[in-house]
Amino acid sequence: MISLRKIWTVAERDIRMFLRYKFLLIMRAIWFVSQISLFGLVVNTMFTTKVQNAVGGSYFNYYAAGIIITMLYSTAVFIGYDIYEEADHGVIEYLLSVPVSRKELVLGRSIGGGLRSFMYVGPMMLFVLYLLGVSSFLQLLLALLSLFLFTFGVAGFSITLAVSIKSSDRFDILMGVTDALIVRLSTTLYPIAFMPQYYAGIASFNPLTFAADLFRWGAGMESTALTPPLLSAFGIIAFFSIFTFLGIFLHERRLEGGGWQ
Amino acid sequence: MISMNLADLFIMAIVYTNMVNPTITKEYVSYFVFFAPGLTITALFAAAFMIGREINMEVRREISHYMLSLPVKRWELAVGRVLAGGIRGIIYMAPLLATTLVITYIYTSVLPSLLQLLTIIVALFLISIGTSGLSIALAVSTTSFEKYITARGVVYYVLFFCSTVFYPMDLIKSALPQLTFIAQYNPLSCGADLSRAFLLGNPPFTPIMLIDIAFFALIFTSLAMVAYMKVTQK
């Protein structure tokens, strides 16, 4: 029987640990500010009227919403790096000895990884929502609930990869490549209509596309969303379920026995 | 980092090419061709800037005391650190420069002359050691980790985004007129525009580009050397 209290204890630990990553927190915040105040503003003047119309009138608004999703993603995957830090310092073995089941451990870590990402990006999200304006609070609430699940799914994805690979160098490389591709092959930065077909096909099934479309729908930018909100929500739920299940499965089988490189 | 740079070029730049107003990039063939030289600069900048983080860690952990016990003079140590950061930038950037040359040749059928290529490489090397020097100077300016990261982040992203790496100068002048001065004299802008001048013929080459880069390299290399020697002696 899974104990919610134990899951929360694990999640709370991960949330507190996040505050130690000052380098990441400060750099990402400055990155966000420079994206909004420098890159986004200049790039907005670069595009054709057709593009501006396709994104609901302002590419800057479209881009600002997409940046939030990339921030959520990049901070949620950090839990995978935590696992390697812990493996390095022998903390994994300690965690395996505490009275928390493997399932509770991985669920707690997914929730903690996702929640801390959401808490960190929250103020930036509020700022972007203030810039965009919100037409329906119910739509926004539904979108935010789905984004919660999205961050849990990303954390679960990161945990799954970390535990499967068990090599920090290979994990670093794989996450770097994944990060580069998953953000650029999605609608976080640009609408799918302007992507070459071979990129558009991948972007259509990208969880970041679902998250970005849902966030824009929640903020009232319905015309810019490629996927209907219900389908996006379903895509995010599927993504979250798959990687949480895989995370639990692999965590139980791969975590013990050492072998971390 | 390589995957990020290549993804920027072969995914983001390709998509942006379909979105950008053609009148803005007609002098450069397309946005994709315009961006390629800029990407070389971003790669060089990112790689050369990394050394500062390592040196800041050494200063905070007082590993610099060990460095002083080595049979290396202090100024040799300082020069070596700055040079190392610069060479790292060059090594990392080299394949991307080759990629840029291939791309510009495919689209324009023009290769730079030997002198032009040499000028590009020298300019990039100067930017690299200047960036390394800037990073080291920042790294030794404070032992507070939070202050260092904040200063590092602000300098890094202002130089990065307030330059002609991603967009032509005219757009910066219209969208952010208050930052035009920074963008114009930003060594990243000068490096990117100098590369474009020789590879694409636009913007026209002006000696100010080289002078700006040379001054940047001289000032920050000197500053880094002096600051590093002072800090290691504490």
Image (tube, coloured by chain):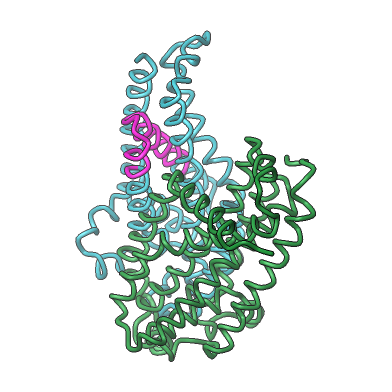
Give the quadrant of residue A245: bottom right
In this view, the residue in front, A56 or A143, is: A143
**In the rendering, at what x and y percent does residue B118 appear?**
51, 43
Query: Can residue B168 be seen in the rendering of this structure?
Result: no
- What is the drawing colour of chain A? green
In this view, the residue in front, B234 or A45, is: B234
- What is the drawing colour of chain B? cyan
**In the rendering, at what x and y percent does residue A141 appear?**
41, 81
User: Is the residue A181 above or below the residue A166 in the image?
Assistant: below
Give the quadrant of residue A176: bottom right
Left or right of residue B142: residue B44: right
**In the rendering, at what x and y percent does residue B30 appear?**
49, 73
Which residues fall within the magenta stretch? B124-151
Query: Which residue is rendered at x = 48% and y = 53% of the image?
Result: A15
The question of residue B141 being in magenta is answered with yes
Query: Which residue is rendered at x = 46% and y = 12% of the image?
Result: B68
Question: Could you tell me what secondary structure mostly forms the magenta stretch?
Answer: helix
Give the quadrant of residue A159: bottom right
In this view, the residue in front, A127 or B125, is: A127
Left or right of residue A29: residue A2: right
Quadrant showing the C terminus of chain A: top right
